[in-house]
Image (cartoon, grey):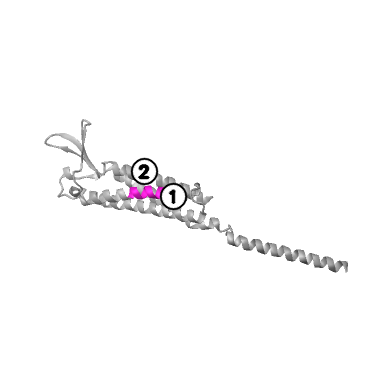
Amino acid sequence: MLSMFLESLGMALCLAGSLLVMVACGLPMWKVTAFIDSNIVVAQTIWDGLWMSCVVQSTGQMQCKIHDSMLALSQDLQTARALTVIAAVFGVLALAVTLAGAQCTNCIQDEALKGRIVFTGGVLYIFSGLFVLVPLCWMANNIIVDFHNPQIPPSKKREIGAAIYIGWASSALLLMGGECCAAPSPRGEGRVSNQIHPHQEHHLQRGQEALRLRNFRGLGNEAKTATK
């Protein structure tokens, strides 16, 4: 019962984490800056994302431009784009694997095999969380270092955007959910430990029949002795 609860909890956490990974991957708010140009007196906010950059004017107008080339991006953005996509793919694969081996489904009848499959899905979820966490921490570190660098002009400085916070939340959910899925799965073989293999059951039945036959013969001999 506890094993099924942990599996269900882990799958729910990982599903939410995978969805947040996709949201963070699509949002252009990885690096955010807000400044006022003292010469033109125009307030604007610049968003830098994995796939596009946007400029939001003080009037509410927003213009977005897709990155022309991946090679033109900074190294942290390139790494974040690759690892985030890999994390999303791992999340989808892990969802399919855990659903196939979950105790609440009947896709596979062998309980021991189902336990190993769920364990594999949990490991995939953990890898997905790590793939998200690495670029997030790297990019956040670069943003903080550049923000405190006096040689960088204020118009070029960035702040941590909402997508990074969403990514951190998704990584935490994936790591916790993956641990919940993987933890009870090695005990999945325990779910069949009390079951008897068909070959063993055959020998057990033969032994029981032989025991009953010996008891019957013993009763017959006792009856003959009593009649004499």
What is the x, y in percent for residue 51? Answer: 24, 43
| Lateral position of residue 183 relative to residue 156, left or right | right
- In reply to whether residue 85 is colored magenta, the answer given is no
Q: Which amino acid type is shown beneath numbered disc 2?
A: Leu
Comparing 92 with 9, the one in front is: 92
Residue at the image position 40 percent from the left and 50 percent from the top: 94
Residue under pointer 1: 98
Report the amino acid beneath label 1.
Answer: Thr
Residue extending farthest to the right is: 228
User: Where's residue 165, x and y in %?
Assistant: 31, 45
- Say if the magenta span includes residue 96: yes
Name the residue carrying label 2: 19
Name the N-terminal-most of marks 2 and 1.
Answer: 2
Q: CA distance from mark 2 to mark 1?
A: 16 Å
Q: Residues within 10 Å of mark 1 (few under 14, many from 20)?
A: many
Residue 24 shows in this picture = yes
Determine if residue 184 is in view: no
Assign a secondary structure to mark 1: helix
Q: Residues within 10 Å of mark 2 (few under 14, many from 20)?
A: some
Picture quadrant of residue 39: top left
The answer to which of 54 and 162 lies nearer the viewer is 54
State the image coordinates of residue 121 (x, y, percent, origin top left). 42, 52
Q: Which residues are magenta?
A: 87-100
Determine whether label 2 and label 1 are within 8 Å by CB. Answer: no
Instruction: Find residue 27 and report its horizontal and vertical position in percent.
Output: 28, 41
